[in-house]
Image: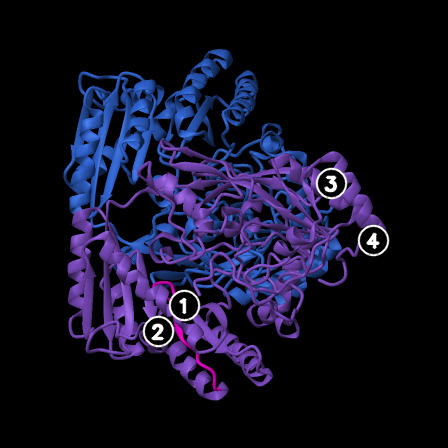
Chain colours: A blue, B purple
Amino acid sequence: MKNHQPIPTPQDQAAANRALKRQLPGRLLTDKDSRFRASLDNLRLSVMPNAVIRVQNPDDVGTVLRLATRYRIPLTSRGAGSSATGSAVPIRGGWVLDLTALNQIKIDRVARMATVGAGVVTADLQAQVEAQGLFYPPDPSSKKYATIGGNIACNAGGMRCVKYGVTRDYVLGLKGFFADGNPFTLGLPLKKYASGLNLRDLLIGSEGTLGVITSADLKLIPKPEKRWTGMFAFKSEAAALKAVVALFQAGLNPSILEFLDRQSVACAEQYTGKPVFAGQPRSAILLIELDGRPAEVRQQRKGLHTIMEGRAVAQREARTEAQAEKLWQVRRTCSQSMFSLADTKLNEDVVVPIEKQAELIRYTLVLKKEIGLATPTFGHAGDGNLHVHIMYNRASQADAEKAKVGIHKLMKKVVELGGVITGEHGIGLAKAPFMSLQHSPAEIAAMCAVKKALDPLGILNPGKIFEVFEVWDHELIDLRLPWDHR
Amino acid sequence: MKNHQPIPTPQDQAAANRALKRQLPGRLLTDKDSRFRASLDNLRLSVMPNAVIRVQNPDDVGTVLRLATRYRIPLTSRGAGSSATGSAVPIRGGWVLDLTALNQIKIDRVARMATVGAGVVTADLQAQVEAQGLFYPPDPSSKKYATIGGNIACNAGGMRCVKYGVTRDYVLGLKGFFADGNPFTLGLPLKKYASGLNLRDLLIGSEGTLGVITSADLKLIPKPEKRWTGMFAFKSEAAALKAVVALFQAGLNPSILEFLDRQSVACAEQYTGKPVFAGQPRSAILLIELDGRPAEVRQQRKGLHTIMEGRAVAQREARTEAQAEKLWQVRRTCSQSMFSLADTKLNEDVVVPIEKQAELIRYTLVLKKEIGLATPTFGHAGDGNLHVHIMYNRASQADAEKAKVGIHKLMKKVVELGGVITGEHGIGLAKAPFMSLQHSPAEIAAMCAVKKALDPLGILNPGKIFEVFEVWDHELIDLRLPWDHR
């Protein structure tokens, strides 16, 4: 996948901008502030686009793509920009397509489906859906900001995937436009669909490289009647992760199963000045949610306590929403407090088989010793999706070099364990160097052939997924983004 | 998608056969009986292949594909051959790849996953999985014969999709070979995976046109503890389908929700000589299964009865497995007894939105009048997937012509109603004439570009999906296949 990206001449870019202003008056923004805001995502690598286009309705996208095709303008689609991988960064310049105004929500209670614009914020959809007694489970941690379009672009996950699956599992239909500006309808708001090649799922997770999605038909399920949350402390990570295995062996079906290692918990305890569990400082922790009908939750809770007896050294239960919120605050504090270790956090959303998680945790400690940087880890233990963090100070060239070595070693280990280098963030720029660890040359060639089939001019989000990009060689921007807790 | 199919010369075909015999001794069958059995599927259109290759292990497939690429031999993969659409018919001759020997099953109870060969029979997998307290929900009606490879090739559905989804929803990873013989691993036995373009889901439902799948990692879920089955009679189809809507409005979540129209029920009653419901002959029927934990099933059952009161004119409940089996027998009898109307059945697995089902049923009666052929309809009312049957006598040229007109009209109506021409059978040959009703030229062009990207020589299951094929112009074979009830 080389060199078929467009590099428009300044003349072509100017002509394209003029044509766009003529065809879609009022959409093109070229002021520095707008361009800067569209120049970066949560990776904080900033590359200025030539202009930002604020889409007002789906058909605008077709017009933009026809012009982008005619003048060979690179086009990067964008929602909130909360991507962790740089996938929303316009590294070849050109146009950024801002889809946030496509924020319509239509809910069909009988069919249990919602049709939503690409710019709808995930948490907004969830609130509207739940008000109707229904449930949209995918819950990436950025859900208060992230858009459905972005969720689909990287096949976002979250905490409830252990029971409910990922974004892909809820997408029935997609509307949008191919690279040449022709509209597509891929799938429909129907529960079964077996007609033609499945381009719908090809586009899900393709990070804006194959087409531009303007709306999606999403599947909804009945809202669980009851939720129960419990937090359990363990002497060691191994003990906590053995409990995870035991829980599945016993047939339990938790809706959330989060794990926090001792490094993470120690950060939180240092930050707040008190132990999470009195008398059991620096424990490894499992945070568990059960949901369903009341009788089901009761039965599962009983089973859970049987398993935890003799394994957990302390526990706490939430009987109210407010108490549950307090337990979740522990998880959030762990995430924030890591910045007491260093100013920069590499957050790697790796996945390994459930029974290999203990081995991965052991390896994070080996790595910590080898590279001399903290490696606090927490994550979704119910699906083997652990967020391994490598903490370093950006100003230190030596630390940055160690972090770089660390991440390469980590990725190699993950693949060795039968895992995947990204479970919910996608590849973007940050993971591109590891593609060849995960996929064979034939697999990558097949992906590139498919990319070329759907985007022969290479105008859609060029430079992502397939080109090795060393984030390390670029300066990152230090600024506060809406979702930063710090 | 024209003319890039291979037409090997007899010399090339002979050379390919010789090379195959040398490289994989004992796999090549050229006797007439073996070739005849591989020449057809449930569509009963027979086209003889040059030879059948009985794969003994996955690597054989790579060898076969390398030779097929070298000599440009058309290659049609095959499991049980229960496809309803002709997708397993080798209409360009060449080789048929028989994958039924790839029948290994490996179950991981903790991870809740199974790794299964493409040749595993779906019901065999289900039995093994259920013995371990787990559940693999997809249940195409051919499950006692159909293979997992075939299920994946057409993204098979079945009765439990209303609650549990289709085959695609359970596929985590695929192993197999690209057209050029290079092996692939697409996805892994992990619950989250966001690396690279999603070729896994592109291959699911692609009917063997993009690659050959040799094994799959499948997701399993906890086995429901309890099941309850009930059957309800209604004065009209409209009343039954209104009850379906009411049931979803009330938040119920049935695991099966089958509908039988009065034409279907009348067939069964004529066949058995007694009414399904005494005193209520020729009713429309809903067959409903609830599953889950006992308390959940009890609660749902109560809700269901509240809805059915005043809507259903009669009802029957199963309290034991044997009683439930009797209720299911009604459904099966409907299917068999239709052959009392005529000797040939067109079974169209169309899908329309839930609330449009009553309109579709009204249309089947308009159609019945217009074409003068019976149109008994039953199916999966929980996901709008109704099997509309058009019954005709094959010997009558006039009737065949009427059936042909009828199916075209039906497909047009389905698309008008916002539906899809196939929900679980796929396109194959039989639905190919209707692709342009469902998909725009740009969508079809994109599918063809993707097909060409992954199979540039056009050797994989050539002639399917994209080429208009008039089944009517071909003679069908009258023979008994293993899954025939008649």
Q: Which mark is residue B271?
A: 2
Q: Which of marks 4 and 2 is nearer the N terminus?
A: 4
Which residue is more in the foreground, A90 or A170?
A: A170
- Queried whether the magenta region covers residue B382, the answer comes back as yes
* Callout 3 secondary element: helix
Kind of residue at disc 1: Gln
Label 1 chain ID: B
* Callout 2 secondary element: helix
* Callout 1 secondary element: helix
Evaluate whether label 3 is on the same chain as label 1.
yes
Kind of residue at disc 4: Pro
**Do tag 2 and tag 3 residues touch (Cβ < 8 Å)?**
no
Q: Which mark is residue B336?
A: 1
Kind of residue at disc 3: Arg
**Do tag 1 and tag 2 residues touch (Cβ < 8 Å)?**
yes
Which residue is more in the foreground, B414 or B468?
A: B468
Q: Which mark is residue B10?
A: 4
Identify whether A138 is placed above or below A370. Answer: below
According to the picture, the residue beneath numbered tag 3 turns out to be B66
Cα distance between the residues tagged 4 and 1:
43 Å
Magenta stretch: give its range.
Answer: B372-383
Please give left or right for residue B141 compared with residue B186 in the image.
left
